[in-house]
Amino acid sequence: MFYSYCPNCKTGFEIHVRLAAMKCDSEIGVPIYYSPCKSCGYANRGYMLKLSGGVSENKLYKRYINKHKNDEKRIGE
């Protein structure tokens, strides 16, 4: 199970997903995977593997996905 969050349209939810290889280090040992957001089309919607399943984990993941929002990584580049 992954936690998915789009820093552009601010939608977040848990999802079962097969991810592409594009990722970056989140600095906490859980990589952030990227794919386009189906709601708004933003290229850097982030997915992180759920470990504990707690609400505090989701907040931490939102923080790291937002931190990497300004990365120049784009799908397909």
Image: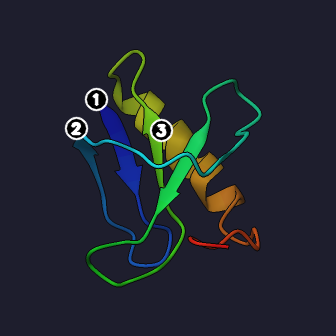
x and y percentages locating residue 22 in the rendered image: 60, 52
- Rendered view: 46 above or below 75: above
Dot 2: what SS?
loop
Residue at image position (35%, 23%) is 54
Residue 73 image position (x, y, % from top left) = 70, 68
Using the image as rendered, state which of residue 76 and residue 31 is in the foreground. 76
Callouts 2 and 3 close, C-beta under 8 Å = no
Q: Nearer the viewer, residue 73 or 6?
A: 73
Which residue reaches farthest bottom?
40
What amino acid is at disc 3?
Met
Query: In whole angstroms, how far apart are the C-alphas of marks 1 and 2?
Result: 5 Å
Secondary-structure class at tag 1: loop
> Where residue 6 sits: x, y (%)?
43, 66
Query: As drawn, is 14 to the left or to the right of 3?
Result: left
Residue on which disc 1 sits:
1
The residue that disc 2 covers is 16
Q: Farthest residue toward the top? A: 52
Q: What crowding class fits label 2: few (fewer than 14 Cα within 10 Å), some (14-19), or many (20 or more)? A: few
Please tell me whether mark 2 or mark 3 is closer to you in this view: 2
The C terminus appears in which quarter of the rendering? bottom right
Read off the residue under disc 3: 48
Q: In the rendered picture of this protein, how many numbered marks are placed on residues?
A: 3
Mark sitting earlier along the chain (2/3): 2
**Horizontal side, residue 17 vs residue 41: left or right:** left
On screen, 43 above or below 67?
below
